[in-house]
């Protein structure tokens, strides 16, 4: 009884979590002394509540770097001495359910869902008399809830489905839903968002909020993911073949004329060029000790590099666990390609002048924009870029009709922007996915791409032979590894409520 009371108290804390704002661009207003009861009385209250939902995206870059990029053939991080959570992710360890990374990812997304559901439950005509404004608030909350559930499905498979705010005791009676059931909510939320999100916002405080094109982009990803071959009974791919549904959405975004490739790849990630014409949706950050900066940048560079190059605060990856860009990925770049030179630091001198041959992702690091500590980087993180829209279109086109001149035009447009002069002819699916790998290095897409394409098991088995010099990766990467385990602390809340994903201890 004492243990159950402790767990219920924990969930009560989660279910009445108060809202803090994402950043000054989203009209920050901390509400540390206010709960949801009696708070939602006017439009300003709801905007602050929405900012609390957006705030839960702050961990998005870390989640996708640690659970997608590290898991994939892009990085090699087996660990040298101490064992870090991301080493276990890299090594396809089957005992991941007790790691803090798995638990914090699960809890963070459900915290976001709880916040979104609270906004939705409190929404009423008395507080928001204007119907259009009320529908826009509902659309933003549903867009974000869909994003959280989409990540949960991709990482964990079928998960508990909360489509409204629930009490702690109610939560203890809600089992895992099927992947299909979760997708039904995701698709419904995104379709609502597409219909009711405004194409533009009127004030600077609204910079970074979702518009219909962001919702269409995420829904296109959903359809592509659902369409992949089903290799795991609880995995995110269903073999649904919804390529045309994805293609229609992608064509809508392209046809809008609102977005385009900017001339220089590096400019996409410039601190002086945020929210540029290539960004369809990103996670907003701001520096200055406001408590709304980004921590994700310091998850990439080594601690040794930070000391050598004057980063004046703690942070960076540990010396016993570097996150090294894989040899296989580096060898895949053509000589003219500018993306590897910009995205990857290849070697450096440490603070004693000794050479290090480590390779790490540097595309988000600008030594002239450091903030006040490792939690205070100001660079926004791209969730969907226009180049992603183009390459998803190429992917959908190939699945529908095979190779075509239209696909070649898309792939060559991306390659040309990267500085590659030799065009590709008759690009097949493998070429499209390899182009995605190089275009989105460090953006947390690679593992998701491998899973939805059905290429994960074969690709990672081949990559292990080439790159696993420490021989720490699981001997047999199998279908069970396509998703992560349910956190053990969730299984312990109520025996038998959730079952563990197969293959995990």
Image (cartoon, rainbow, N blue to C red):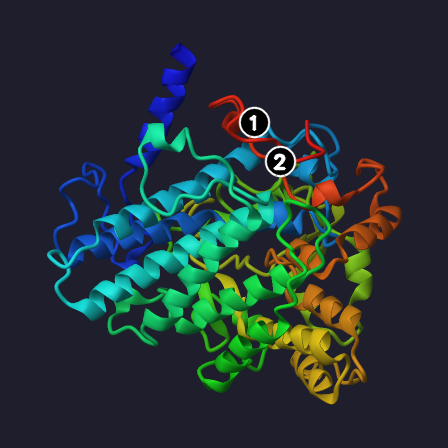
Q: Residues within 10 Å of mark 2 (few under 14, many from 20)?
A: many
x and y, in percent, of residue 473 in the image:
80, 38
Q: Which mark is residue 488?
A: 1
The residue wearing badge 2 is 485
Measure how far apart labels 2 and 1 are at the Cα level.
8 Å
Residue 61 visible (yes or no): no
Q: Which quarter of the rendered picture does the N terminus lie within?
A: top left
Secondary structure beneath label 1: helix
Q: Which residue is drawn at 30% across and 54% down?
A: 51
Residue lying furthest right in this view? Answer: 465
**Quarter of the image that includes the C terminus:** top right
How busy is the neighbourhood of tag 1: few (under 14 within 10 Å), some, or many (20 plus)? some
* Total numbered labels: 2
Q: Does the CB distance between marks 2 and 1 fall below 8 Å?
A: yes
Q: Residue at (74%, 58%) from the top-left corner?
A: 454
Left or right: where does residue 21 sit relative to residue 336?
left
């Amino acid at each position: 009884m004492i243990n159950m009371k402790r767990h219920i108290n924990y969930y009560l804390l989660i279910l009445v979590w108060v809202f803090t704002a994402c950043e000054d661009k989203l009209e920050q207003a901390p509400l540390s002394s206010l709960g949801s009861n009696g708070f939602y009385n006017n439009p300003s209250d709801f905007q602050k509540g929405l900012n609390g939902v957006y705030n839960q995206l702050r961990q998005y870059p870390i989640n996708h770097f640690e659970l997608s990029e590290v898991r994939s053939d892009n990085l090699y991080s087996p660990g040298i001495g101490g064992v870090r959570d991301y080493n276990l992710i890299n090594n396809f360890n089957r005992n991941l359910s007790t790691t803090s990374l798995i638990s914090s990812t699960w809890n963070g997304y459900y915290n976001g869902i709880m916040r979104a559901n609270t906004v939705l439950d409190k929404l009423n005509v008395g507080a928001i008399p204007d119907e259009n404004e009320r529908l826009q608030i509902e659309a933003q909350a549903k867009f974000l809830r869909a994003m959280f559930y989409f990540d949960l499905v991709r990482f964990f498979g079928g998960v508990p489905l909360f489509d409204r705010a629930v009490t702690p005791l109610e939560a203890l009676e809600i089992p895992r839903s099927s992947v299909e059931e979760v997708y039904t909510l995701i698709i419904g939320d995104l379709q609502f968002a597409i219909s009711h999100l405004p194409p533009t916002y009127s004030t600077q405080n609204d910079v970074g909020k979702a518009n219909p094109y962001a919702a269409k982009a995420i829904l296109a990803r959903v359809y592509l993911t659902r369409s992949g071959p089903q290799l795991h009974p609880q995995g995110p791919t269903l073999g649904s073949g919804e390529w045309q549904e994805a293609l229609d959405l992608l064509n809508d975004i392209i046809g809008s004329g609102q977005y385009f490739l900017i001339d220089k790849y590096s400019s996409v990630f410039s601190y002086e060029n945020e929210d540029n014409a290539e960004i369809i949706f990103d996670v907003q950050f701001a520096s200055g000790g406001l408590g709304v900066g980004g921590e994700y940048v310091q998850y990439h560079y080594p601690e040794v590099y930070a000391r050598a190059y004057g980063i004046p605060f703690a942070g960076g990856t540990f010396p016993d666990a570097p996150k090294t860009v894989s040899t296989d990925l580096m060898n895949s770049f053509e000589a003219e390609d500018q993306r590897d030179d910009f995205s990857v630091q290849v070697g450096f001198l440490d603070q004693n002048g000794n050479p290090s041959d480590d390779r790490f992702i540097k595309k988000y690091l600008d030594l002239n924009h450091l903030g006040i500590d490792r939690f205070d980087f100001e660079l926004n993180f791209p969730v969907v870029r226009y180049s992603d829209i183009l390459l998803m279109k190429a992917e959908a086109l190939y699945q529908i009709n095979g190779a075509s001149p239209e696909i070649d035009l898309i792939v060559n447009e991306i390659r040309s922007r990267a500085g590659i002069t030799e065009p590709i002819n008759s690009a097949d699916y493998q070429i499209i996915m390899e182009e995605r790998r190089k275009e989105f290095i460090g953006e947390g897409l690679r593992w998701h791409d491998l899973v939805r394409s059905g290429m994960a098991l074969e690709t990672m088995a081949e990559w292990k032979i080439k790159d696993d010099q420490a021989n720490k990766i699981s001997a047999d990467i199998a279908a069970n590894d396509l998703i992560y385990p349910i956190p053990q602390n969730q299984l312990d809340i109520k025996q038998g409520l959730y079952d563990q994903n197969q293959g995990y201890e």
